[in-house]
Each structure stands twice: as C-alpha cells, then as structure tokens.
Image (cartoon, rainbow, N blue to C red):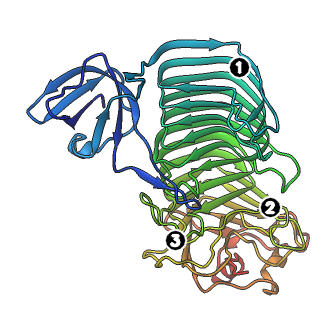
C-alpha cells in the first residue's frame, strides 16, 4: 500500500517531496514494571502526490508502507501525518542516501556517561557497512525513526550500561524497511533488536556469543512483517546466557504479527505476548517458551492480557536437558507469565527429545493469575511429531508441556501419525509426578494413527509398535509441580 487518506490540519495540505512521520495515535504501549507509556509503530514517509478534499487528503508516498494503517477504512481517523520536529524554530531535515563504511569505534567501559557508538535518526536510505565497535555504555548503534536502513557486516563487542549490565548491540526503533546481513555481537544483552514497532525487516546471518538474553529480539510495539533467517547463538555455561530468539516482550506487550523465522539455532525460542499469525521453520533449540506477560499490576494501555496466538512451527528440533536434582536446575531465572498463555499453536513434523525430563520441552509457566480465565482454553497441536527420551533413570514421565501452577486449562492434541519413542520404564508408575486434571489430551487419528514404538535406548523394551492407548497419554505428563 502506497496511498492513504488522512484528515487535514485545517486548510493545510501535505507538501509534495516533503518527509512526514505517519503514525496511529491510538497505538500506545505500557511498560509492565515502570508503567511508562509510549507511542509505538509509525514510519518515516516522503510524499509523492496529494489529492486534497474539503477536510481530508489522499496522500501517495514514494515507498510502499511497511505496516497496515487502519487499512479497512483507508487510514482515516486516528492515522496522523505529522511534521518532523523543529530545532531552533527550523524543522529538521532528513538525511538521504548516505553510506557509512569502515567505521571503527572504541567506546568507554564502566562509565556513568553514555557512550554509544553511533546514533542514526530521521534518515532515509542509510547504509552502515563494515562496522566494528568495542566497549559501549548503553546501546551500540541506534537507528531511530529511519526508513530503508541497511546494516551489513557489523561487529559489536562488550556492550554494557553504567551498572555493568549487558545492553543492546544493534537497535532499530520505530523504523521501516530494514535489512540486516551479517551482524555479530559478543558479551551483550541483545544482538539485533526491533524496538517499538519497527516493521518490514529482513535479518539474515546474525550471530551472538555470550548473549545474555536474545540474539534476535522483537521488543514490543506491534511489529509487522519480518523475516529472520540463519540466526544463531553460541552460549556459555548453562544458566549463564540464554542466547534465545524472542518474538515479543513481556514488559512491552504489544507483540508482533506476520513474522517468519527459518533455519536458525538458539537455546530458547520465546514466543511472548501478542505474537500472532507467524511461522517458525527449521529451528534447533533446547526449549520453547510461551510467555504471556509479566505478573504485574500495571495495566497495558494497548495490549492487556496479550498472548501468543496462531503460530505454526514446522520441522523443529527441540532437545532439552533439565539437569538433575531440582526442576530446571540448568535454566536461568525467568519471568513467569500469567493468564491464558497460548492459543492455536501448531507444531508440525518436529522432533522433541528429552535428555532427561526434569524440564519440559514446551514451557507454559503460570503464576497466580489476576485475570479471568478465558474460553476456549489454551491449546497446542502436535502433528506428525516424534517424541524421544534417552534417560531411563529420571522421573517416570516425558514432560511435554509443564503447567507450573495449575490455573488454566490446556488442551493438547496429537494427530497426523505422531510417534512416541520412550523407554517402557517411563510408563510404569507415577512416582514423582502428578497428572494435571486441567489438561485435556486428544488422540486425533483422522490423518493417521499416533503410535508408540519401542525405544532403542531401553534394552528391556521388546514390544512391537502399536497404536497409542489411553494409558499412554497418562504417561505423557502434564504436571503440576
């Protein structure tokens, strides 16, 4: 879409060849902990032509819009075309078609002063190429309200704030039309971050070493339309670094939609808040987390009660190891979530393997919820998946989905000829685990029988393959701990 209709500001007509910032004045977001409010989304636009009416103007832009602006009504109403800020009484100009190549920036470490490597604001057609930054307080490179931004072959190391807390390496805030290719970060909180509703992005070949949280992160704002491919995190000792891929944020809770993630590897795959209508393919990880929102009394002005919805994951390889002795002993502390945590989640043609089963492959961590339970319940479907377990000494249950505090009902469906490949010893007794009455397991055989096969890891299991029985589902534990 390149054309939209907006209300005129009195008799004023948008000027051809001029930059404006297009945004929806109703798109607010509230931080779960601080209650800070911010406008999100929007994009820098340049006017190509205008057809003015008595009270409205239909405006054509030089670039296609990266996000929908009330498209059902053509953009009229809450969609505003705002002039750019003024400095000293003069409206700022927009930098156009600039390339910054070969910069080497060595910043300040452990300082109370802000010393970011680079800020790029109100710019269109900017390329940062062959960049190296080392030691930064706060954020490495920030792109703010820019359009058509390219970051190619960028490396950042040791990004931390004044409190020695790792921070963002490469951040895009309220930007549109973003391309990142070959970005690397070491010793940082994040590698690549889409902040406050940045949309229309393509991220390929991003890598992180010792990333405290996410090698790629969508940091709220109702981001729209993005592609993430060949992103990998190399982590340090378990419990020290997450190295996750995070779609959505539990503090800034508007989430994202129409996102595609393919051919990536990470420790955790986090689907947070209002991530919806999105697809994940060929990702290798140790766990998938559904996080609805922080347990916070702060109501969200834009996305209260948001949760992951309508996400399809195909060809995942989830191999998880929960340690021993205590639940999740190798997992770092995380924000538990509340409310109805996911709906319409489909996992297809994937392999889920438990090295030992103290932790679940799919974590739906619930705390006491102040929200009203929703109908229908949370639901997840596994289609054509294989479930494997190699440790016969751990608790006698394959923890596929774990409900930490039983506050919401969860519906789990197996269909499309799923294969359960678990040692027979795990189907004997139920010591150490409690079957949750709040989990409904559905054996859907409309597209093929779900079967249980002998496990090569269990020498005592000589039985031939057979169709799943009701007692088998009782051993696919959905536990309340």
Q: In the rendered image, which quarter contains the C terminus?
A: bottom right
Which residue occupies the foreground of this view, 480 or 292? 292
Q: Do the residues labelled 3 and 2 touch (CB within 8 Å)?
A: no
Residue pointed to by mark 1: 131
- Which residue is at the far front? 88
Mark in the foreground, 1 or 3: 1
* Residue 367 rendering spot, x and y as whole percentages: 63, 75
Q: Which mark is residue 343?
A: none
The kind of secondary structure element at disc 2 is loop
> Horizontally, is 197 left or right of 474 in the view?
left
Mark 1: give few (<14), some (14-19) or many (20+) Cα within 10 Å.
Answer: some
The kind of secondary structure element at disc 1 is strand
Q: Work out whether mark 2 precedes mark 1 in sequence or the reverse, and give the earlier one.
A: 1
Which residue occupies the foreground of this view, 143 or 369? 143
Q: In the rendered image, which quarter contains the N terminus?
A: top left
Q: Work out whether mark 1 precedes mark 3 in sequence or the reverse, and give the earlier one.
A: 1
* Residue 158 rendering spot, x and y as whole percentages: 80, 35
Q: Tell me how far mark 3 sits from mark 2, CA to CA.
A: 23 Å
Residue pointed to by mark 2: 331
Q: Quadrant of residue 3?
A: top left
> Horizontally, is 269 left or right of 1 in the view?
right
Residue pointed to by mark 3: 340
> Horizontally, is 408 left or right of 269 in the view?
left
């Amino acid at each position: 879409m390149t054309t939209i209709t907006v209300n005129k500001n009195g008799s004023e007509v948008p000027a051809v060849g001029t930059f404006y910032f297009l945004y929806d004045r109703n798109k607010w977001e509230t931080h779960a902990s601080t209650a800070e409010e911010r406008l999100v989304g929007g994009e820098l636009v340049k006017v190509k032509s205008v057809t003015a009416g008595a009270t409205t103007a239909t405006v054509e832009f030089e670039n296609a819009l990266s996000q929908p602006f009330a498209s059902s009504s053509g953009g009229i109403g809450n969609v505003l075309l705002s002039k750019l800020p003024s400095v000293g009484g003069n409206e700022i100009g927009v930098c156009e078609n600039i390339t910054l190549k070969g910069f080497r920036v060595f910043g300040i470490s452990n300082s109370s002063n802000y010393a970011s490597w680079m800020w790029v604001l109100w710019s269109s057609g900017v390329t940062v190429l062959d960049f190296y930054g080392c030691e930064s307080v706060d954020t490495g490179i920030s792109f703010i309200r820019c359009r058509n931004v390219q970051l190619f072959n960028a490396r950042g190391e040791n990004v931390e704030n004044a409190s020695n807390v790792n921070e963002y390496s490469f951040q895009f805030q309220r930007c549109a039309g973003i391309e990142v290719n070959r970005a690397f970060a070491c010793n940082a909180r994040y590698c690549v971050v889409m902040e406050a509703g940045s949309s229309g992005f393509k991220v390929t070949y991003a890598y992180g070493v010792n990333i405290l949280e996410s090698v790629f992160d969508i940091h709220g704002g109702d981001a729209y339309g993005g592609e993430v491919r060949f992103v990998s995190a190399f982590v340090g000792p378990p419990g020290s670094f997450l190295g996750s891929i995070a779609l959505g944020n539990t503090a800034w809770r508007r989430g994202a939609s129409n996102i595609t993630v393919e051919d990536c590897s990470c420790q955790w795959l986090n689907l947070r808040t209002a991530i919806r209508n999105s697809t994940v393919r060929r990702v290798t990880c140790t766990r998938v987390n559904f996080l609805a929102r922080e347990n916070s009394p702060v109501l969200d002005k834009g996305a209260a009660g948001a949760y992951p919805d309508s996400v399809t994951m195909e060809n995942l390889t989830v191999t998880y190891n929960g340690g021993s002795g205590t639940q999740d002993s190798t997992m770092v502390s995380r924000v538990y979530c509340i409310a109805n945590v996911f709906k319409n989640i489909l996992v297809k043609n994937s392999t889920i393997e438990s090295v030992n089963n103290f932790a679940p492959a799919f974590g739906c961590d619930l705390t006491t919820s102040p929200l009203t339970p929703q109908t229908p319940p949370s639901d997840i479907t596994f289609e054509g998946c294989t479930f494997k377990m190699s440790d016969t000494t751990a608790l006698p249950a394959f923890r596929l989905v774990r409900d930490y505090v039983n506050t919401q009902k969860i519906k789990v469906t197996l269909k499309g000829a799923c294969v359960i490949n678990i040692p027979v010893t795990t189907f004997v007794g139920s010591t150490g685990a409690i079957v949750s009455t709040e989990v409904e397991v559905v054996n859907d055989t409309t597209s093929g029988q779900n079967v249980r096969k002998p496990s090569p890891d269990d020498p005592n299991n000589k039985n031939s393959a057979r169709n799943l029985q009701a007692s088998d589902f009782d051993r696919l534990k959905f536990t309340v701990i």
